[in-house]
Image (cartoon, grey):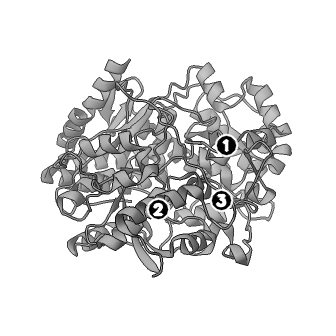
Amino acid sequence: MKSKSLLTMGMILSISLATALSGCGSSSNEATKDTGASGEGKSTEKSVETSAATGEVSHDTELTLEVYDVAANYQGLQTGWYGKILKDKFNIVLNIIAPQVSGDASSLYQTRCAAGNLGDVVILDNIDMQECIDAGLIADIGADIGNYPNLMKYEEQINLFNGDLNGVAEGSIYAIPTEMNTNGPTAYIADTVYTCPRLPWDYYSELGCPEMKNLDDLLKVLSDMQAAHPTNANGDKAYAISLWPDWDGTSIETVNQLTKWYGQEVNGSVLLGTDNSIRPLTDKEGAYYKMLQFLYKAQNMGLVDPDSATQDWTTVCDNKMKQKRVYLFWYNWQRGFWNTPEKSEQGDFYVAAPIEDLNIYQASDTYYGSGRVWGIGSNVDPEKKARIMEFLDWLCTPEGLTYQHAGTEGLIYTVNDDGTYSLTADGFNRFTADIMVPEELGGGKWSDGNNNINQWIVGSVDKNPETGEPYGTDFWSSTIKANETTGLRQWQEKYGAENEVKYFESTGQLVPVPSINKPLVNDTTDIALIRNQCGDLICDNSWKMIFAKDDAEFNQIWDDMYTQIQGFGWDELVQFDTEKWQVVVDARKAAS
């Protein structure tokens, strides 16, 4: 979402920094539940009883909640299996308002803010929460939250975030961070990194798994792969790389993520490095320019999908990634659109393809939050507020989190004799095939009925006290065992490591940076204007550079862009962001 400020562009950004806070400990989840498909859970009953004791919550009347949600890729009513769970359990219906699919996210945000009603439930980037609090659009839940034990498991994180907000009195709570966990601020339990080159193992093996020293070697591999497989099995045209512009902000988001291959993370107008450096986004020695060059070279080799500058994410996901029409993945979650144990057994799965000069920027698990927050709109009446709080508390229960990060028992997973869970065949295929849901569970396709809020309070890495394993299905011991396929064993033998995290750690290419939500200085009105003007130019010209016809045009576009943004005050913006993010660098150095 590209957010433009209504008031003062209040900026509270999620940052990754090493920290050693005193008193940071892991709390344990102690709630219990039944995991039946009916959706009745003991932990939820406890929270309902608590709510009833304080607010006399009644479910007699159906309640439609407007959810303003910057994370959503869907707009409209939540239907299907997840919608049925919420209707049966709480008699609520979610009407999701999704800025990034509305056609004009900035206009929608400003219009609803000006009307004084952003939504009943709001999910915002940290950057926007401060100004929404200042504008009186967010309710204070400080007097209520203590009555909700499942939310209170994350009391430390919630209090820390709200305590750092400007103008928030002690004891007041306006924002609940997203994707928290109880594992501690330095933990990183995944077996994959967030972003690195990933290729289909069957096609890579077919080429002899050539070693790659740099990006030019990767382009050679991709070129050979596309030449050998110009279409997918259905005869549809395939490309090595496919991009989409609808996630762009003040620079191209896909390029921003690729900078992490080379030890830098884009933060506004600057690049933060794992080496504690801060440099302008426009530094030609920086990773943003480097990855633009990579994509430009790929495009000139015929490796970039020509629809990349105009298609949206849904098109890429449904029509290309899920059809094996894209050969380079980078996000770890993209694998879920193709990989299954059956395909892995045949070697037909996407897997990390190491490059010798990678220096991976990887934040640790988001103990303190991921950079977005939940809130309740200030216009809700006390009864609606109590029902929302009950819902939010349930989202933090083992039952709510299992629905969120796995799905329904029986259809998606089964319970083993030892109390752990195992995915069913449909569970393994839920992201790669059209899994149909029985009518009694909501009907329709599983993917259509999945939680379209697309954001959660508690991350999948948090441990389920009922199983002793994380909520995320990828972390279940049964899933790991099921994925011990011929294909995976071939990869492990080739690279001498159990998984990609172990491999990159062994080569010194991965040293995770612990994460924390920390408030930074707000944009002034002048800085906000400079940021928006420069951002528009950087995005527009970055796309032009990717599709430049030759080196001369590529360089000319860059030079012209740099001249233009200089005229808009780029150096002032870089200085502002450098001073702001120096707080991060200093904290990392102190922690080290």
Question: 251 or 587, which lies in front?
Answer: 587
CB within 8 Å, label 1 to label 3: no
Query: Callout 2: helix, strand or loop?
Result: helix
First reached walking from the N terminus: tag 1 or tag 2? 2
Nearer mark to the viewer, of 1 and 2: 2
- Residue in the foreground of this view, choosing between 171 and 481: 171
Residue bearing mark 2: 49
Q: Let me know if residue 585 appears in the view.
A: yes
Circle 2 packing at 10 Å, graded few (<14), some (14-19), many (20+), is some
Other residues around mark 3 within 10 Å, as few (<14) / some (14–19) / many (≥20): many
Residue furthest to the front in view is: 53
3 or 2: tag closer to the N-terminus = 2
Which circle marks residue 407 in the picture? Answer: 3
- Left or right? Give the position of 238 relative to 93: right
Residue at 17% from the left image edge and 48% from the top image edge: 169
Disc 1 residue type (three-letter):
Thr
**Residue 516, percent across and down?**
38, 36
- Disc number for residue 355: none
Disc 3 marks which amino acid?
A: Gly
Tell me the distance, in whole angstroms, between the alpha carbons under discs 1 and 3.
Answer: 15 Å
Q: Looking at the image, can residue 69 be seen?
A: no
Quarter of the image where one finds residue 96: bottom left
Indicate the secondary structure of the residue bearing disc 1. loop
The mark nearer the N terminus, 1 or 3, is 3
Packing grade of label 1 (10 A; few <14, some 14-19, many >=20) is some
